[in-house]
Amino acid sequence: MLEDITETIDEFLARHSADVEEALRGAAAAEIMPRFRRLAAHEVDQKGGPHDLVTDADRNAELYLTKALGALLPGSVVVGEEAVHANPATYEAIQGDAPVWIVDPVDGTRQFVHGDDGFCTLVALARGGVLLASWTYAPARDQLATAVRGRGAFLDGERLFAGPPAPGRDLEIATSHPDYTTDEQKRTLLGLWTDGVAPRACGSAGLEYLAVARGELDATAFSWELAWDHAAGLLLVEEAGGAHLTVTGEPFRITGGNALPFTAARDAATARRVVGLLSGGV
């Protein structure tokens, strides 16, 4: 039945990328931005603890996108962060044969709750574990980054090229935030605390990936593999000329089972350098 879903995924993207962008903007306009810096106490909850927050904006934006994206591509499935929290079994669709939309309705919920504009909505389209297209929308900054496999990465219509880091300068690396890491995970990241490296805690993962794709950040180093945090950004970095590797030197797989931590970097040489440093912390 997959042949009947649409013409082909390439043809679908050629015809409907603008519709996906419209869905992102619509979700933000209807459910996210009206609550930005206006959240009431009853609109914020904890999921796994005081640092794992969810808001009505997360829930409602995901419902909006689930309906809109599913209608755009009949036969596709949606794997969203909040739906998986409610029913973990839905995450398994990422490993299936049907096209899958991977959605993080508000990446950087912590920033959103605190009134910081460093949050975004992430959508990626994948099939058979292969990332095909991605959208990173930062509504409070009015920025939209897109990528299609083999066709490049763009920010507000301008082509992105990450380029290699400037020689002789410390590598700036955004790492898993200490509030979200275990003691063991902290130990695996210790290899980055060395001469020639300037590690810092990450904010929104999606915006950190965008910074790598823009050549404003040299690399990331993350110790978790939930696909909605990484899928959109990894394709964006790839299409901007960057690379991603796990600590064993293999590319990151959105289907899971990765050796952690892993990095996404401005170029392959930087990715290998970061993995070498991380291997010393494992």
Image (spheres, helix red, strand yellow):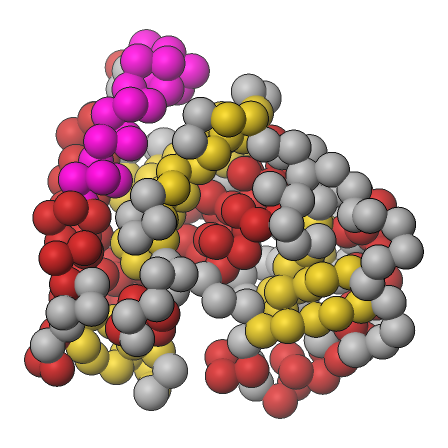
On screen, residue 206 above or below 3: below
Q: Quadrant of the C terminus?
A: bottom right
- Whether the magenta-drawn stretch holds residue 21 is answered as yes
Residues rendered magenta in the picture: 7-27
On screen, residue 91 above or below 154: below
Q: Residue at x 18, y 77 (%)?
A: 44
Q: Residue at x 14, y 69 (%)?
A: 38
Residue 5 in the image: state x and y as whole percent: 27, 19
Frontmost residue, 101 versus 127: 101
Residue 196 in the image: state x and y as whole percent: 86, 67
- Whether the magenta-drawn stretch holds residue 8 is answered as yes
Q: Main secondary structure of the magenta part?
A: helix
On screen, residue 106 above or below 103: below
- Residue 265 visible in the displayed image: yes
Q: Total label count?
A: 0
Which of the 4 quarters of the picture holds residue 105? bottom left
Residue 123 in the image: state x and y as whole percent: 36, 43
Residue 162 in the image: state x and y as whole percent: 67, 39
Frontmost residue, 75 versus 205: 205
Frontmost residue, 279 versus 38: 38
Answer left or right for 277 relative to 257: right
Answer left or right for 194 relative to 46: right
Answer left or right for 122 relative to 252: left
Q: Residue at x 81, y 63 (%)?
A: 170
- Residue 282 visible in the displayed image: no
Q: Quadrant of the N terminus?
A: top left
